[in-house]
């Protein structure tokens, strides 16, 4: 969460900008200007909006979204937008403050988690089996924001984005509906592919660096064992690591999945203790320059995740 002093500075800068810029233009070269909080929503909006939109993100590539704090320039960018898309489920705890600071009545705002039954987070979620038994509930009552990692729930986000674009640009309604339907068909195909693969796995336990896979496992019947909770900065204690290693041995876990933006040392420690392999899992927070140059996107990255999951879980 943003420190109070930093929040005051950002709010003050935002109010000053709002007072001096006046009413920003409603489009960019005749296109609807969309600002997404981070990459998955950017990709969804590009696919739904097509040629009628220009999309940017607030959270830069390589920045862990949980750690992001908006700046005055971010407020300025949002003040010139027609649509603001954010994930919700407390992924962007700064969103309400920023929207209020912009103070733009005609800004269409979409919390793309709307309509999704949110999982309560397990910030102490190092103990996968216990978290499953207790429903993954956090003592603080927070929510797991990683909804985009379930393609079935990504469809809900796509539909919320479609509706926001239609509200901002009613003349594009038919195109947005067509594009959303086509992209959702691709998500359906991805969902079916994952479902079929996960039905033929010899193992069900996914040991991952932080608790990103709650919705994924809820959909596909796996059990997440997380080294740290929903907040990747919550470092596991030595006792937590010992408990995870014991669980991994008891459950015959043979692979540890690490995320590119998370310190891999805990994953490497556990892997060496269980004589297992270390495999990549891309949480699709953003594209690296190499991924962008290779033409990767949400669907291709999720297909890459599936390929590694099949290796780690022994799927046919």
Image (tube, helix red, strand yellow):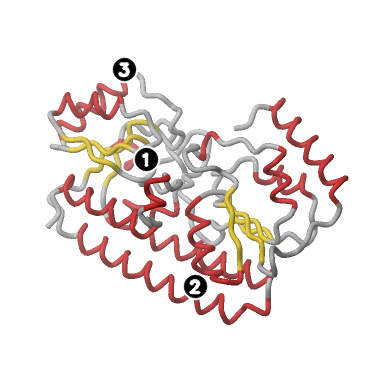
Quadrant, the N terminus: top right
Q: Secondary structure at mark 2?
A: helix
Sooner in the amino-acid sequence: mark 3 or mark 1: 1
CA distance for labels 2 and 3: 47 Å
- Front one among 284 and 203: 284
Residue at the bottom extreme, as displayed: 174
Quadrant, the C terminus: bottom left
Q: Which residue is mark 1?
A: 134
Q: Which residue is mark 2?
A: 180
Q: Position of residue 310 (x, y in %)?
A: 19, 52
CA distance for labels 3 and 1: 23 Å
**For the residue carrying disc 2, how many other residues have a C-alpha within 10 Å: few (<14), some (14-19), or many (20+)?**
many
Q: Secondary structure at mark 3?
A: helix
Q: Look at 21% across and 64% down and name the residue there.
A: 196
Above-or-below relation of 114 to 278 = below
Q: Look at 75% across and 30% down and name the residue there.
A: 9
């Amino acid at each position: 969460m943003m420190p109070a002093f930093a929040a005051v500075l950002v709010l003050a800068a935002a109010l000053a900008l709002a007072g001096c810029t006046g009413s920003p233009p409603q489009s960019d070269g005749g296109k609807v200007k969309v600002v997404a909080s981070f990459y998955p929503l950017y990709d969804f909006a590009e696919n739904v909006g097509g040629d009628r939109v220009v999309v940017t993100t607030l959270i830069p590539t390589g920045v862990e979204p949980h750690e992001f704090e908006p700046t005055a320039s971010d407020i300025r960018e949002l003040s010139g937008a027609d649509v603001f898309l954010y994930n919700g489920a407390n992924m962007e705890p700064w969103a309400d403050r920023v929207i209020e600071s912009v103070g733009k009545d005609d800004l269409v705002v979409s919390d793309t988690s709307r309509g999704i039954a949110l999982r309560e987070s397990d910030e102490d979620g190092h103990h996968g089996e216990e978290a499953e038994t207790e429903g993954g509930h956090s003592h603080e009552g927070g929510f797991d924001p990683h909804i985009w990692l379930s393609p079935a729930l990504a469809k809900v986000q796509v539909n919320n984005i479609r509706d926001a674009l239609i509200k901002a640009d009613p003349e594009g309604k038919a195109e947005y509906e067509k594009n959303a339907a086509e992209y959702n068909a691709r998500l359906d195909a991805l969902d079916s592919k994952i479902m079929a693969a996960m039905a033929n796995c010899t193992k069900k336990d996914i040991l991952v660096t932080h608790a990103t896979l709650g919705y994924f496992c809820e959909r596909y019947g796996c059990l997440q064992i997380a080294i740290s909770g929903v907040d990747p900065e919550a470092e596991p204690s030595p006792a937590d690591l010992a408990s995870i290693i014991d669980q991994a041995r008891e459950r015959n876990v043979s692979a540890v999945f690490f995320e590119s933006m998370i310190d891999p040392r805990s994953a490497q420690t556990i892997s060496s203790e269980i004589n297992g392999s270390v495999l990549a899992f891309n949480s699709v927070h953003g594209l690296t320059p190499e991924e962008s140059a290779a033409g990767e996107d949400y669907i291709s990255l999720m297909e890459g995740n599936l390929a590694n999951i099949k290796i780690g879980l022994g799927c046919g």
